[in-house]
């Protein structure tokens, strides 16, 4: 590798200072036209160690055709793009080998903390085998993953990993370890909060009425929504329990409904929170009685109160 510390820097001093201040010191990077600037966490770039570490975050397309500039705390260095491109290519090959072995060794849903024999630096890794496609995992899948892994967050062999490899049947993704745990624990917290909300909603919104009247109200509401062009599900499986969910192509697209003997302030608030959590366009609370506080809370919101005898003439 031939380097010249006299090579003119390809960016103006002001632009260099902006990059120095804005890029993540742990190998954050930015492609600016034909220049790839990579921030390194030391005063003066180390062409061996910093190239190897930068290859862990930079992708092949980022390097292609670029002049590579390593930006240190005080000094900067232009290096041959081939040096970083070769390191990135080796990392991509290593990632592919890890994914292939993970598919062979782990069943869908399995996970393992390890160091890969082909990694000269012996960086700790976490491999996670996902069913289906990584790109198509939905919120419920990440909720389940978060519930499985969150209890392991305090184990150093899991929490202090350098990289996390998500491996599907035909695709894979590689994430930085710290960011993965940050996102996963946030996902787990949000899922726990949704579960608590579900418990509160079940206590506040679900009517303690006898099953027959409740079933009759649901049947009437189901029939009316079907007349209005909705596909209706009763007691759907959802993050937040509802009595009915309906969907159609015309607005309002998604409707959820709850039964309550009395629509008071607490019930109204619970219905508002549930409707937002489920990202529904409209929430309906079927209640025989509505007090002033419940009525006030629903003014100018996406939740409406409806009396049982108004179901047959409901218009949306």
Image (cartoon, rainbow, N blue to C red):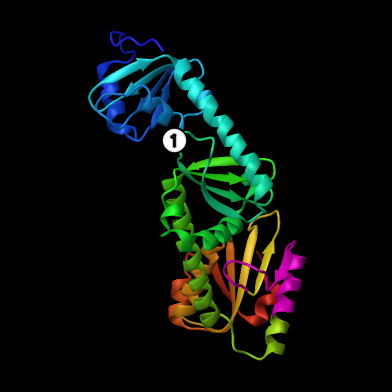
Across and down, in percent, residue 8 comes to 30, 9
**Which of the two residues, 78 or 255, is positioned nearer the viewer here?**
78
**Which of the two residues, 310 or 1, is positioned nearer the viewer here?**
1
Q: Which residue is drawn at 49% across and 77% down?
A: 200
Q: Is residue 41 above or below residue 132?
A: above
Residue 76 visible in the current orientation: yes
Q: Residue at x 41, y 55 (%)?
A: 156
Q: Residue at x 68, y 76 (%)?
A: 311
Q: In this view, does 35 lie above or below 245?
A: above
Local secondary structure at mark 1: loop
Mark 1 nearby-residue class (10 Å; few <14, some 14–19, many ≥20): few
Magenta stretch: residue 92 in it? no
**Residue 24 occupies quadrant:** top left
Name the quarter where the N terminus is drawn. Answer: top left
Residue 133 visible in the current orientation: no
Q: How many marks?
A: 1
Across and down, in percent, residue 66 comes to 46, 16
Residue range of the region highlighted in magenta in the rendering: 218-242
**Which of the two residues, 180 or 158, is positioned nearer the viewer here?**
158
Magenta stretch: residue 228 in it? yes
Across and down, in percent, residue 72 comes to 28, 26
Across and down, in percent, residue 254 comes to 64, 60
Q: Residue at x 58, y 54 (%)?
A: 111
**Which of the two residues, 300 or 96, is positioned nearer the viewer here?**
96
- Residue that mark 1 sits on: 121
Apparent side of residue 37 relative to residue 117 in the rendered image (left or right)? left
Apparent side of residue 52 relative to residue 8 in the rendered image (left or right)? right
């Amino acid at each position: 590798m031939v380097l010249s510390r006299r090579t003119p820097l390809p960016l103006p001093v002001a632009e260099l200072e902006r990059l120095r201040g804005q890029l993540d010191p742990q190998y954050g990077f930015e492609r600016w036209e034909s220049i790839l600037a990579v921030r390194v966490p030391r005063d003066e770039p180390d062409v061996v160690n910093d190239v190897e570490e930068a290859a862990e975050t930079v992708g092949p397309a980022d390097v292609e055709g670029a002049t590579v500039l390593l930006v240190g705390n005080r000094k900067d260095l232009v290096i041959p793009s081939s040096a970083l491109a070769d390191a990135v290519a080796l990392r991509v090959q290593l990632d592919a080998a890890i994914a292939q072995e993970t598919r062979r060794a782990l069943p869908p849903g399995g996970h393992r903390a390890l160091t890969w024999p082909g990694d000269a630096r012996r960086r700790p890794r976490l491999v996670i085998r996902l069913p289906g496609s990584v790109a198509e995992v939905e919120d419920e899948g990440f909720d389940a993953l978060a519930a499985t892994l969150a209890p392991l967050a305090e184990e150093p062999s899991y929490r202090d990993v350098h990289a996390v490899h998500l491996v599907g049947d035909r695709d894979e993704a590689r994430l930085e370890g710290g960011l993965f745990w940050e996102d996963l624990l946030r996902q787990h917290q949000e899922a726990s909060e949704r579960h608590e909300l579900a418990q509160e909603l079940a206590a506040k919104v679900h009517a303690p009425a006898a099953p027959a009247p409740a079933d009759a109200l649901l049947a009437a509401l189901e029939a009316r929504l079907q007349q209005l062009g909705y596909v209706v599900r009763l007691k759907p499986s959802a993050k937040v329990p509802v009595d009915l969910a309906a969907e159609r192509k015309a607005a309002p697209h998604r409707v959820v409904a709850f039964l309550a003997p009395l629509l008071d302030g607490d019930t109204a608030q619970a219905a508002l929170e549930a409707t937002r959590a489920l990202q529904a366009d409209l929430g309906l609370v079927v209640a025989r009685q509505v007090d002033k506080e419940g009525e006030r809370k629903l003014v100018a919101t996406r939740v409406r109160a409806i009396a049982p005898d108004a179901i047959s003439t409901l218009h949306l």
